[in-house]
Image (cartoon, helix red, strand yellow):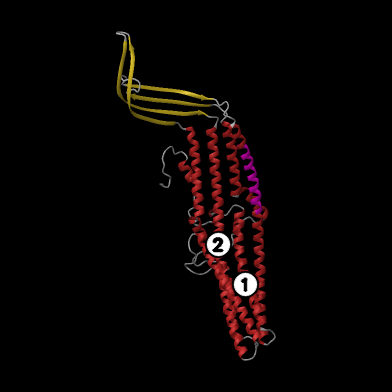
Amino acid sequence: MLLGGRFAIGARLAVVTGMLTAAVSSADSETLEQALVLSYQNNPQLNAQRAATRATDENVSIALSGYRPRLTATGSLSEVYLENVARVPLPPGFARTAGENAVATVGASASQTLFNGFQTGNRTRQAEAQVYAARETLRATEQTVLLSAATAYMNLLRDAAILELQRSNVNVLETMLRQTRDRFSAGEVTRTDVAQAESRLAGGRSQYLSAESNFVTSKAQYQQAIGVPPGRLRAATPVDRFSPRTLKASLVRSSTEHPTITAAMYAVDAAVFQVKIAEGTLYPALTLQGSVNKSFGSANALDNLQSFSAAIGAQLSVPLYQGGQEYATIRQAKETLGQRRLDLDTAREAVRSNATQAWGQLEAAKAQIESTMAQVNAAEISLNGVREEARVGQRTTLDVLNAQQELVNARAALVTAQRDRVVASYTVLSGVGSLSPQILGLKVQQYDAVTHSHQIRDAWIGVRTPDGR
């Protein structure tokens, strides 16, 4: 007999493949949904994009300031030395006066733009388009962060399962080596059989160390994506229920809902308004101006005690020629508009390509699971058969070692296929632009970019942000 009954230890490997198909019954275990919530709350890339969106909201307030008056108050205080020499008729000669005078002046001025070639209105509409584009960019960042979090979660789950596989494989190979050495001592096998068992054990330990390294790397990537160290992870399920049923439906949804496309569309709108703003510099500008000034003392006459002046009027400015700068600016804006339209076409093609690729990966992952499950079943039958044949001397130690390795490889491939299946379902959802907390139903307070925009849109004064800074 080549191998004894202790080879039943290999059955321990069958438990590992369940890590990605059955949930861990532990009160302190962590689900993928919980990991996505943590990532949505803590990810610095997402929080930075939210801050960028809030900063873009201020562009609307800046543009609306063009409708509002400009008020300026001035004041000055100075000490003036005056010396005056005047001709006097009787008696003929000159009269000289000299002295110091304290001069204080206070005043206020106001101006209101009445017409500037529709630049203020176009700037406001451009700023609103930029806000909408920033919101879509934020939505795209949310998708990227959530997909990265799901990928990191599944990678760690996969690497943990493969690490356990390799650990169990090393235990089995150590048992095989002990049994082979015992049989060599009894003269039942040759030194070659012992060397083969030793070689396979060394290879198994190398694979275990590699799996351990991958596991440590995945833990670090998990903390980077989620924001907290990993706990005990539960198995995750695909999210196909949220995705379109066919590739055609996926392409239709992605062409209308994907944030990359909608952000590019708003960028085109902003570029259109930029052309109109540049053209507005060729129009006349009409401004209403007023001022009030009160002076105590005079810088020109010692006997002038105080004076008051007030003025109101309108100023019309008609641009005639400014060296050609305004015309170059208009041409530049038109070229930028053409670029934004091409960027929109590029975004559409990229989204279409990514959605098609994601759909293909999902279909491949489904088929891969079926094939690897069949491979595992066949490898298990093969290993059991080789063991029985080895008992009666019809198989060698190398045959059993090979069958053992094929089973380990098949189970590792099944774990990887199960990981790919879940990640592919999230990738498809991201590809059609629907990977969001709302669609996934995450139990988290969702960030509302519209609220901040409404809070600051009509703020005339104040330096504090809505959160108190």
Q: Is residue 396 above or below residue 239?
A: below
Q: Is residue 348 magenta?
A: yes
Q: Circle 2 sits on which residue?
A: 152
| Residue 411 marker | 1
| Secondary structure state at the residue bearing disc 1 | helix
Label 1: few (<14), some or many (≥20) within 10 Å?
Answer: many
For marks 2 and 1, the one nearer the N-term is: 2
The residue that appears at 50% across and 40% down in the rendered structure is 59
The quadrant holding residue 379 is bottom right
Q: Is residue 288 above or below residue 258?
A: above
Q: Is residue 299 magenta?
A: no
In the picture as drawn, the residue positioned furthest to the front comes out as 93
Asked if the residues shown at circle 2 and circle 1 are in contact, with their CB atoms under 8 angstroms apart, the answer is no
Q: Position of residue 377 (x, y in %)?
A: 65, 74
Most foreground residue, 271 or 202: 202
Real-space Cα distance between discs 2 and 1?
21 Å
Which residues are the magenta region? 333-353
The three-letter code of the residue at mark 2 reads: Ala
